[in-house]
Amino acid sequence: SGPIHANDSCWCCIWGYVDKCFDLIIGKWSKKMNRLMTIFVLVGSLSATTSFARGEGNFNKEMRPVLTHYLNIQELLASDSTKGVKREAKALQKAINQVREEKVTGKNAAVYRNIKTDIKHSAKAMIKAKDLEDSRKRFMKLSEPMAAWTKISKQKNVVVMYCSMKKASWVQKSGPTKNPYYGSSMLSCGSKA
């Protein structure tokens, strides 16, 4: 064994320092891993929330053709015409059958199921309408679930209107009021619901 040099004690200090640095690095790495795990948990939570929203989003996307046919009926009735109403009601009925409400989960799931069911029954009734007045009466029933869906889903470029004379709502494109229940006799009768 040779003499101890001053440099040997420095090596001990250096190794001690390296050991502390390693502990510090591992500690910081551990904190970073904890942060990463927290981020992964948050992303997972957001994904679950997104899939909930996606269920409603898919339903709303599948409802667009239904809304298109509904708006066509509304425009026809507002112009005092039944020509094309049955065709649009049949197309609406076909479109509503394509909507998959079972993918919606969470607090609005039952509401979406009821909306689809009510639209199906009302569309079937619209097909059987005999004349303009009968079509308008049946359109009131169709408008109830359509107005509810429009409000819940916050659809753009359409508004829910209310006719105080008929005590009934309807959905129409944004713009001038076009009352489907009175047509040309009181076309502008109605206010935003």
Image: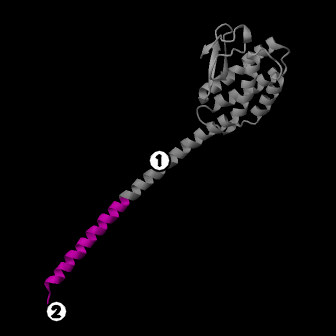
- Cα–Cα gap, marks 1 and 2: 60 Å
Looking at this view, is 50 or 68 the one in front? 68
Return the residue nearer the eye: 49 or 106.
49
Give amino acid for label 1.
Leu
Please tell me which residue is depicted at 34% across the width and 65% down the height of the picture. 26
Position of 91 relative to 15 (above/below): above
What span is in magenta? 1-30
Residue 169 image-quadrant placement: top right
Query: Residue 111 — which label?
Result: none
Quarter placement of the N terminus = bottom left
- Which residue lies at the image location 72% right of the left edge and 29% below the top edge? 68
| Majority SS type along the magenta span | helix
Marking on residue 2: 2
What x and y, as percent, mark residue 97?
77, 34
Instruction: Specify whether residue 133 is in view.
Output: yes
Q: Which residue is mark 1?
A: 42
What is the count of numbered marks?
A: 2
Q: Specify whether residue 13 is painted magenta.
A: yes
Give the residue displayed 62% in from the left and 21% down from the top. 175
Badge 2 density bin: few <14, some 14–19, many ≥20, Cα 10 Å: few
SS at mark 1 in the image: helix
Left-right relation of 122 to 9: right
Quick one: quadrant of the C terminus? top right
Q: Amino acid at mark 2?
A: Gly
The x, y position of residue 17, in whole percent, is 23, 71
| Residue 116 appears in the rendering | no
Confirm whether the magenta stretch covers residue 17.
Answer: yes
As rendered, which of 69 and 23 lies closer to the eye? 69
Tell me which residue sits at (66%, 30%) in the image. 112
Left/right of residue 21 with respect to residue 175 in the rendered view: left
In the rendered image, which quarter is residue 4 located in?
bottom left
